Amino acid sequence: MEMPELISTTHDERRQGEVYASSLNNNHLFQKTFYIESYGCQMNFSDSEIIASILNSEGFSATNYFEEADVILLNTCSIREKAEQTIRKRLTEFKKIKIVKPQLLIGVLGCMAERLKQKLLDEEKLVDIVIGPDAYRTLPLLIEEAETGQKSVNVLLSREETYADISPLRLNSNGVTAYISIMRGCNNMCSFCVVPFTRGRERSRDADSIIKEATELFNNGYKEVTLLGQNVDSYYWVDERTISYNEIKENAVTFAKLLEKIALINSALRVRFSTSHPKDITEEVLHTMAKYENICKYIHLPVQSGSTKILQLMNRTYTREWYMAKIDQIRNIIPECSISSDVISGFCTETDADHQNTLSIMEYSRYDMSYMFFYSERPGTLAARRFSDDITLETKKKRLQEIVALQNRLSSESNKKDISKTFKVLIEGESKKSKNEWMGRTSQNKVIVFSKENYDYKKGDYVFVNVNGCTQATLLGKIVK
Ligand code: SAM
Ligand code: SF4
């Protein structure tokens, strides 16, 4: 099924397989080259920047061309069966190069590596290295080992690893927006989801290192940071040096406090975050968002289903009514906030009535955009062990089509409502279609395209733009002085 052209903070279909490009022309400094493709969620794209940094400090440079690489790496996703099929297909394409260049090393990284472990080596004969999300520091060592002809695997999960001290290499960046990973893993155990198994227990990264990274980015000209985690609202960090109960109470950094600390770095630095589990986003976070103009007015709040019965089977820990009350609370505290969602069709036992409840909660929530999927059973998950995947593919797809059609309408309506309003826009670069146009984003995370006219704005500037038209996915506008 064709996915609509929507921009999501979790899983941008257009970025799948993106190559980590090296903009540095300094190959002569390095002895070896690596090529990396990233799949899946933003967390994986952010991890690729950490991996690049680790390899870079060990004498590897990044290349855009797999033909010239000594090591080909695929940073993989396991979230749906299709994601894994895409990787397997890609691996067979690399087989051809390996035949003519037998010394080439091929590594599978990330969630699929963690899920399949040694099996990947047995199934995909050409893979030399298998490395899970918490073991990237050992990648140079594993490469060395693989160079001797051994297959190397490290899929150990950690309770501590946050890569806090590693400064990600942002070679593919637009120089304006960047991701900062603030936590890893997930403790939630949604029954459909493989993430707790592939990314391990939840752990929060040292707040000081996050603030340092954001400050350095700002000092280097970046204007927007997106704080990343599977469940950012459960971020919680206490300095190890804090001992007494009162000190802990005073010094503990919750997600609301972290947001505030980042917002205070500079009012010209925008802050975004993703993803929020509805059960964890607190009133304090909403008030902090309302208080600071530079905390973007946008929340990705995946509902998954609108049926309380299905939500219970999914182990989402909220009911339909509870979720709707959360939407009301957001709209009360931050009236201009845009909200997006993830929706799954055809989860186990889903009836037509359950599906109608999903459509009606989407309508109630008036999502500005959504990522929409049909349920894909993942081996080892709670749902795979407990429930039968009893909805036919045909029904899953039919329901998904209805969900997509509804979201298309809601997105269009949301964009039309913005016509004649003026937004502060951060310019991210030239529009893909024309050198005479800028592309930027509103605080609400909507893409807006507008003519440069004769103004001398540049990438990274803020500009006020009046909306005078729209497509389903993009606002169109004109600069107001
Ligand atoms: N941690 C985030 C959350 O809870 O919203 C995002 C997790 S996941 C990377 C992104 C989305 O993939 C989920 O919100 C869910 O809609 C979808 N997803 C996860 N497992 C799935 C499955 N087995 N089948 C279909 N969609 C799935
Ligand atoms: Fe998966 Fe649920 Fe954790 Fe999101 S919150 S990563 S859907 S288990």
Image (cartoon, rainbow, N blue to C red):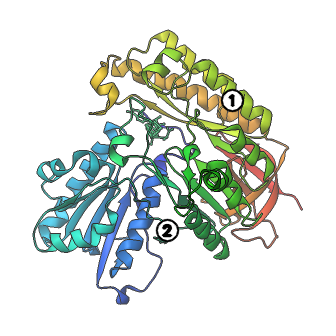
Give the x, y percent position of residue 250. Answer: 67, 53
- What residue occupies the far right of the structure in this picture? 481
**Tag 1: residue type?**
Ile
What residue is drawn where x is 60% and y is 30%?
407
Mark number displayed over residue 389: none
Using residue 458 as the reference point, say whether residue 76 is left or right of it.
left
Residue 63 visible, this orientation: no
**Tag 2: residue type?**
Asn
Given residues 183 and 441, the one toward you in this image is: 183
The picture quadrant where one finds residue 330 is top right
- What residue occupies the far front of the structure in this picture? 244
Given residues 466 and 58, the one toward you in this image is: 58
What residue is drawn where x is 60% and y is 50%?
245
Given residues 300 and 466, the one toward you in this image is: 300
Residue 398 visible, this orientation: yes
Mark earlier in primary sequence (2, 1)? 2
Q: Quadrant of the N terminus?
A: top left
The picture quadrant where one finds residue 91 is bottom left
- What residue occupies the far bottom of the structure in this picture? 28
Give the x, y percent position of residue 284. Answer: 71, 42
Q: Name the residue beneath numbered marker 1.
A: 327
Q: Name the residue beneath numbered marker 2.
A: 172
Q: In the image, is residue 436 above or below residue 90?
A: below
Q: In the image, is residue 131 above or below residue 27?
A: above
Q: In the image, is residue 305 above or below residue 19?
A: above
Q: Residues within 10 Å of mark 1 (few under 14, many from 20)?
A: some
**In 3D space, how far apart are the residues under numbered discs 2 and 1 (Cα atoms)?**
35 Å
